[in-house]
Image (cartoon, rainbow, N blue to C red):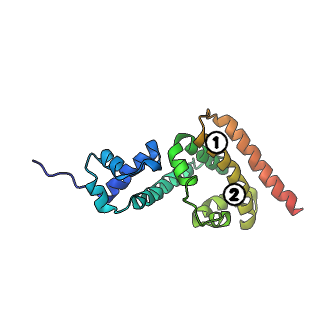
Amino acid sequence: MPPSAKITKDMIVDAAFEVARERGAEHINARTVAQKLNCSTQPVMYHFSKIEQIKKAVYEKADLFHTAYITNIPENSSNPMREIGLSYIRFAATEKYLFRFLFQSNGFSEKNLQTLIDAEELKPFLTVLQSVTGTGSEQAKEIFLSLFLFVHGYASMFANNTLEYEEDVIASHLYRAYVGAVYAFKEELK
């Protein structure tokens, strides 16, 4: 009889990620992960003594996946902020379970909006926004916050409902929100 394949921690996280992606993070447990790996639950529990540890690792993997997804925009894009917003909404429409796990679970517990806006991962987006709008760092954060709340609301609608994804319509709404946020900010400065 050939030796059985060694189940690694990475294999377990990858299998749990697929469970979260296909059925939702609430379905991650030793049995569903073991089924994905075609093994017993013993290797799963050997590497992770608690299911919450697996979910935390899957959350981190999903976060990286999401970041890669929304930042994969053409270099020659005439409006990178629009592309990022559309990608965020498209992610919610196509990866409903991952979006819910990332943004509608308790992943942001003990954080506030200012902490999220000040996150290191957001700096490249804010730099682009500063460049496009001709504003300073703090002003770009205010504009970004307005846009983020709009985009997140739109994305949440797709993640939680069966809606038809119409990119042209969404792009038009996103453009109006962007122009409105920049206009409102510049009006406040007068």
Query: Which quadrant is the C terminus positioned in?
Result: bottom right
How many discs mark residues in the rendered view?
A: 2
* Residue at 66% in and 58% down: 128
Furthest residue toward right: 190
Write down the residue under mark 1.
157
The percent coordinates of residue 151 (x first, y second) are 67, 48
Q: Is residue 82 above or below residue 61?
A: above
* Residue at 78% in and 53% down: 181
Dot 2: what SS?
helix
Q: Would you say residue 77 is visible in this rendering?
A: no
* Residue at 34% in and 54% down: 12
Q: Which amino acid, mark 2?
A: Leu
Q: Residues within 10 Å of mark 1 (few under 14, many from 20)?
A: some
CB contact under 8 Å: marks 1 and 2: no
The percent coordinates of residue 152 (x first, y second) are 65, 49
The percent coordinates of residue 31 (x first, y second) are 33, 49
Q: Which amino acid, mark 1?
A: Met
Q: Nearer the viewer, residue 154 or 53?
A: 53
Write down the residue under mark 2.
129
In the shown orientation, is residue 110 left or right of residue 68?
right
